[in-house]
Image (cartoon, rainbow, N blue to C red):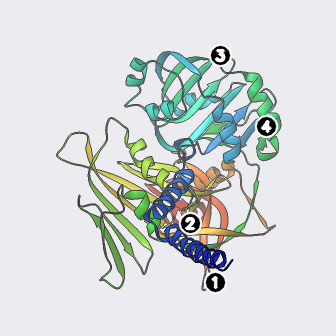
């Protein structure tokens, strides 16, 4: 009996020691770290934005035989846009109008759907991102073409890509779209749309109505994202990088290729530079979207906004409307520049770590004039009536000092002489000039 008790004690000591050893392996064994890394990677993958989200049109217009409907809501536009998936296109033709009035008249047919961008969009990128079916030869023809408006004529079964400034229309026959599906979507989403009389004119993707628009006021708590968000999004290999934090007001991160990310700790602005980026037959639109997709949702609902001279601007949106911040700090800009090598570009990306995070409940609203009334005020102040500059409703970002709170106020913005102005500011400048 004495030997049995001694044996039991020895076995217990061995089991206790074994349990300590297994605990040591669980907490400190390198495989555990690898599992953690895999989990972090999978979370980043889930957070990535799709190009369908990044390149979503900014406005939808649907005209049937009863009224004209307009929507900025991302969820509504996505529902209508998704109807184009796998549509078959054929019989490409190109037409050029002689005047903007003639082009504007082409929007007056019934059973017409319009998707609008605030700047030029690559036709080949759009066709690929939204999975419209087209022959390889036809895709090659579309490679250098751009547009700002998509018009779907359900009665004539014609799908048109319109370049407003050039008065050029690239038109295809289509099959695979059902007007009944669109009518059903309209019935489900009318409460999220602005309704106008049938005969309202459409210019630059806006319904020229005097009818006022009432929009929600928003407030958010702002926060600065960690710089690792940009580090992980822009560097392919985050293990073999060098961090230089010797300067008190800045951090620099670089790799062996010479790519460098600089973070200004005072202003929270970032600057990323990459040399000799290989395009691999992709468009600059796709190349710029690659970096924005990697940022995921950490920087808000980023979407393609405008392009000018190979400088792509992405802005955060709220409830389907772009956000404007003083000194353009709310935007992320991706600028391409030439290199001596073919199919390669240098890249410069600028942006801010500061984003809106937590919404503060509010029931306040603000009334804005309709697009037709805004244009008329601009014309009365001296703007050339033949110009019709691009306008859009956006939210002005205002920091409430020392509170960490941001007010977002809706107003009209006008793209005039290569700058975006609050329309009230531009009105004062035009009145002073004239």
Indicate the secondary structure of the residue bearing disc 4.
loop
Q: Name the residue under label 1.
A: 403
Q: Which residue lies at the image location 59% right of the left edge and 17% below the top edge?
A: 174
Q: Earlier in the sequence, mark 3 or mark 1?
A: 3
What x and y, as percent, mark residue 370?
71, 51
Indicate the secondary structure of the residue bearing disc 3.
loop
Q: Which one is closest to the eye, mark 3 or mark 1?
A: 1
Kindly tell me whether residue 97 is visible in this rendering: no
Q: Mark 4 points at which residue?
A: 197
* Distance from Cα at disc 4 to Cα at disc 1: 44 Å
Q: Which of marks 2 and 4 is nearer the N terminus?
A: 4
Q: Earlier in the sequence, mark 4 or mark 1?
A: 4
What x and y, as percent, mark residue 78?
66, 40
Q: Residue 284 carries which label?
A: none
Indicate the secondary structure of the residue bearing disc 1.
loop
Q: Which residue lies at the image location 23% right of the left edge and 58% below the top edge?
A: 257
Q: Which one is closest to the eye, mark 2 or mark 3?
A: 3
Q: Name the residue under label 3.
A: 156
Q: Name the residue under label 2.
A: 425
Q: Which one is closest to the eye, mark 3 or mark 4?
A: 3
* Distance from Cα at disc 3 to Cα at disc 4: 23 Å
Whether residues under marks 4 and 1 lie with C-beta atoms below 8 angstroms apart, the answer is no
């Amino acid at each position: 009996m004495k030997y049995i008790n001694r044996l039991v004690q020895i076995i217990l000591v061995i089991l206790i020691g074994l349990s300590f050893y297994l605990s040591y392996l669980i907490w400190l064994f390198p495989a555990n770290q690898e599992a953690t890394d895999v989990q972090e990677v999978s979370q980043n993958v889930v957070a990535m934005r799709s190009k369908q989200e990044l390149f979503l049109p900014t406005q939808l217009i649907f005209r049937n035989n009863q009224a004209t409907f307009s929507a900025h809501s991302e969820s509504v536009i996505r529902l209508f846009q998704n109807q184009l998936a796998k549509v078959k296109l054929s019989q490409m033709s190109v037409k050029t109008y002689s005047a903007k009035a003639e082009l504007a008249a082409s929007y007056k047919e019934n059973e017409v759907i319009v998707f609008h961008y605030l700047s030029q969009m690559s036709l080949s990128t759009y066709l690929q991102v939204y999975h419209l079916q087209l022959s390889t030869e036809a895709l090659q023809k579309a490679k250098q073409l751009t547009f700002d408006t998509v018009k779907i004529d359900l009665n004539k079964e014609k799908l048109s890509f319109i370049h407003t400034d050039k008065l050029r229309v690239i038109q295809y026959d289509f099959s695979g779209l059902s007007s009944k599906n669109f009518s059903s979507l309209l019935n489900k989403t009318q409460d999220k749309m602005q309704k106008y009389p049938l005969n309202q004119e459409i210019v630059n993707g806006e319904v020229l109505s005097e009818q006022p628009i009432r929009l929600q006021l928003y407030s958010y708590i702002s926060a600065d994202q960690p710089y690792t968000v940009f580090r992980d999004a822009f560097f392919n290999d985050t293990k073999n990088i060098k961090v230089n934090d010797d300067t008190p007001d800045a951090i620099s991160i670089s790799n062996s290729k010479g790519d460098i990310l600089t973070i200004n700790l005072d202003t929270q602005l970032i600057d990323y530079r990459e040399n000799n980026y290989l395009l691999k037959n992709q468009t600059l639109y796709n190349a710029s979207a690659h970096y924005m997709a990697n940022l995921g949702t950490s920087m808000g609902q980023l979407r393609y906004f405008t392009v000018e001279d190979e400088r792509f601007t992405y802005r955060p949106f709220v409830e389907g409307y772009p956000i404007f911040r003083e000194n353009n700090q709310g935007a992320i800009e991706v600028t391409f520049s030439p290199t001596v090598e073919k199919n390669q570009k240098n890249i410069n990306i600028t942006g801010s770590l500061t984003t809106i995070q937590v919404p503060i409940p509010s029931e306040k609203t603000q009334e804005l004039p309709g697009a037709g009334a805004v244009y008329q005020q601009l014309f009365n102040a001296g703007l050339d009536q033949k110009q019709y500059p691009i306008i859009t409703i956006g939210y002005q970002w205002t920091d409430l000092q020392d509170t960490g709170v941001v007010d977002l106020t809706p107003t009209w913005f006008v793209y005039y002489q290569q700058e975006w102005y609050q329309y009230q500011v531009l009105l004062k400048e035009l009145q002073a000039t004239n």
